[in-house]
Image (spheres, grey):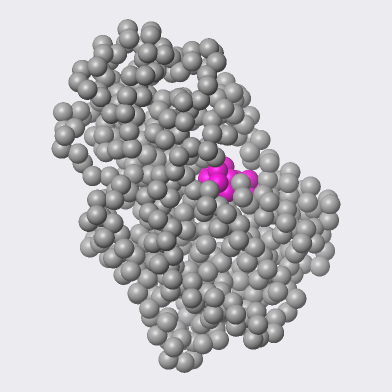
Amino acid sequence: MLSFFKVNDPFRLIGVAVYLILLAILMLAFFSFPITEPQLIWMVLGERLGDGFFIYQDIIDDTGPLSAGFFTFIDLLFGRSKFAFELIGRLLVLFQIIYWNSILLRYRVFDENTYLPAIVMAALFHLTFDLVDLSPALLGSTFLLLAIGQLFSQTVLQKETSESTLLIGIYGGIATGFYLNYWIFLPFMIFTGIAISGFSFRQLLLSLMGFFLPLLFMLVFFFWNNGLEETLQILPMLIFYEKYQYQSMISWILLGIFPLVLALVGYFYGAVLRGSTINQQKQRQIIILWLLFSVVEILLLKRQATYHLTIFIPALTFFITQFFLNFGKGIIGKLAFLILLFGLPVSGWWYYQNELNSNSGYFVKPNPAISEISGEKIMVLSDDSSFYLQNSLGGPFLNFKLTKAYLASEKTLEQKAKIFQNLGNQKPEVVIDPEGIFKKLIEELPALKNLYAESQPGIFRLK
């Protein structure tokens, strides 16, 4: 099987597609998992934005503005469809696989032209089930991959190319618009452009202009809709609010130990034991730096869930492919290839099956205690988002931990008036408040007493 994908033949991509389809059928038909808490939040957000509201201005959440718009579009077409998230996610994964393999071929990254990177990347995307589901991280990483492809072009071209340097920045800026943590690409782009690609001052300015151009358009959009002040108030808070720790990073390392070992051996063999061209050395340096900046990005996560690991997949593909190109003829290489293809999905399924059995907060399960609240517009001030399974968002507060940080910060009279105005305009029919946050807010804004009454402990209803 290893030799099948090692051949330089585009029809080998059919084999990759068959592999993806078979795993999709198995995962969806036999090993499916409940909806995750982040997925439910994204669906609720898209649904609410479709009602004519704006993120940051009318809804407190940390989703990137481009992702928020994309989720709104999905809701308009499919409603709350978990299948739509899975289908679109897999289409993005297929695009990334084909694109990354084409980049590695076009710029002669390896001594052999091969389609091994495609199947290796496909296997890595099945390390966990949520890596192939739609998420802001997957949307943003698609554009980061396009940016890195343009950086690779700088390692082989012998003249300045304004188009390529501009695209590097534009793709990075769009990626940040989809997933705000990908601002980390900016220092990566500057450092890599100067130290490895040898950017001139003109090229550097062009890339910086490209990066900030999409972000400037987004700010203009918020300004046009009278939400720029609220946006600039919310964005700095995204760095400091409390994390959602769905899984530990130690468990991630244990889960990915096998591909990490293959990547380390591949790096050692390619960098130390074999000679490389100048272009290949530059390409390897770009990938290593990207891994280092990716680690920093992971440390900044606010939703500590495995779907964020998508940022590592292109780099791991790069080094694991080197492993198989050098060890593929022996029994160790063939056995490692089979474990990668079939062992990774099984280990990922086993890991999340244990998470499911341990009642992990990552999965949303119906709560029988709230069956009396159904089909209403609600606002949940709690980590438990299961209330939204049978209800829609009716107020401005969606991300609970960000909301806590937002309400705990010092407010001017104008900002307090804005909170009251948002609650007065949206008027959630039910407010779920187990921690007493809304009760405290009512004390700060006494006019809310005219709108809400506590029907039972921790539950407020619109009068």
Left or right of 47 in this view: 167: right
Q: Can residue 75 be seen in this view?
A: no
Of 345 and 435, nearer the camera is: 435
Q: In which quarter of the image is the C terminus?
A: top left
Q: Residue at x 61, y 46 (%)?
A: 183
Q: Which residue is drawn at 19% across and 39% down?
A: 367
Q: In which quarter of the image is residue 332?
A: bottom left
Left or right of 199 in this view: 285: left
Q: Residue at x 38, y 9 (%)?
A: 446
Left or right of 121 in this view: 172: right
Could you say where residue 320 lies in the image, as x and y percent from the top left?
A: 52, 75
Magenta stretch holds residue 179: yes
Could you say where residue 325 lies in the image, as x and y percent from the top left?
A: 54, 84
Q: In the image as oriented, which residue stretches furthest toward the bottom?
A: 330
Of 151 and 416, nearer the camera is: 416
Of 338 and 242, nearer the camera is: 242
Of 438 and 376, nearer the camera is: 438
Magenta stretch? 170-182
Left or right of 81 in this view: 117: right
Could you say where residue 233 lies in the image, as x and y percent from the top left?
A: 57, 27
Q: Can residue 137 be seen in this view?
A: yes
Asked if 418 appears above or below 272 in the picture, the reply is above
Q: How many marks?
A: 0
Magenta stretch holds residue 360: no
Q: Quadrant of the N terminus?
A: bottom left
Q: Which residue is drawn at 66% across and 86% down?
A: 274
Asked if 161 appears above or below 256 in the picture, the reply is above
Q: In which quarter of the image is residue 28?
A: bottom left
Could you say where residue 297 lies in the image, as x and y percent from the top left?
A: 55, 52
* Chief secondary structure of the magenta portion: helix
Q: In which quarter of the image is residue 295?
A: bottom right
Asked if 162 appears above or below 457 in the picture, the reply is below
